[in-house]
Amino acid sequence: MATTAPRPLQVRAPRRPKADTGDRGTLPRSPTVLLLVDVINPFDFPEAGALAPAALRAARATARLKQRLSAQRVLAIYANDNYGQWRSDFRQTLEHCLACGGAAAQIARLLAPGPADLVMLKPRHSAFYATPLDLVLTQVHARHLVIAGLAADICVQLSAMDAVMRGYQVAVPQDCTAAETPEAKAQALAYMKRVLKADVRRSSALAA
C-alpha cells in the first residue's frame, strides 16, 4: 500500500502590523514623536528632595518644547509609571499629583496632557516594556523620538536604549530631563551620546 509523504510544515515569519491596524487610520502621521517619560510624578520616594528642583527646571523646558512641537503637529505620548496602583488610571495619577502640592503639582500643571496627546501606563523602567508604544509608533509612521522626563539615568536612558534597538533615531534634550545628582545626569547623557548616538543638545537646538 502506497504511503504519502507528509507535507513539510510551512512557517511564516512574523510581520509587523500595518500602519492602520487597530485604529482604522485615525491616528495622525507623526514622523517625529515627543515621548514624555514619568513626568507626572508624586515625588514621594526617599530621594525626591534631591530630584525635585532639577525636575521642575526640566519640566519648564519640556513645556516650552512641547508647545513648539505641538505647533508643528508633532504627537506627544506620555509613558508614565502608575506607582504600583494597578486599579488606577492615568487621570487618577494626574489628579493625585495635583493634590500633592509642591513640585509634583507644579510639574503636573505644566505638563498635563492635552486632548490630542496619547497616554499609557508602563509597569517597568522602559517606556517600551509591556506597553503598546512600539505599535503606536508604527501606526503613526514615527522614525524619530524626542525623549524627555525622569530620570535621565534610569527610565529615560532605558527607554532611549530600547528605542535605538528598534531602529528609531533618538534625541534626549539635556535641559528636558533630570537626575538626582548633576553627575548622574551628565554620565547618562554622555552614555546616550556615545553609545546610542543620541542627540543630547538643548531643546532650543532641536528641529522636528
Image: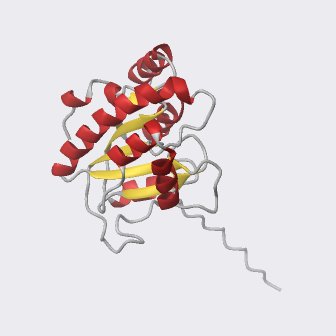
Q: Residue at x 44, y 40 (%)?
A: 163
The percent position of residue 65, horizontal first and vertical second, equals: 25, 39
The percent position of residue 188, horizontal first and vertical second, equals: 47, 21
Relative height, residue 47 to residue 86 (above, below): above
Q: Is residue 9 left or right of residue 134?
A: right
Relative height, residue 157 to residue 7 (above, below): above
Relative height, residue 80 to residue 174 (above, below): below
One can see residue 132 in this view: no
The quarter of the rendered structure image containing the C terminus is top left
Pick out the residue farthest to the left.
71
Pick out the residue farthest to the bottom.
1
Q: How many marks?
A: 0
The quarter of the rendered structure image containing the N terminus is bottom right
Colouring convention used in this rendered image of the protein: secondary structure
Pick out the residue farthest to the right.
1
The percent position of residue 129, horizontal first and vertical second, equals: 56, 48
Q: Is residue 145 left or right of residue 91?
A: left
Q: As rendered, which of 173 and 44 lies closer to the eye?
A: 44
Relative height, residue 182 to residue 108 (above, below): above
Pick out the residue farthest to the top.
183
Q: Residue at x 62, y 34 (%)?
A: 45
Q: As rendered, which of 175 and 97 lies closer to the eye?
A: 97
The percent position of residue 93, horizontal first and vertical second, equals: 52, 54
Q: As rendered, which of 205 and 134 lies closer to the eye?
A: 205
One can see residue 104 in this view: yes
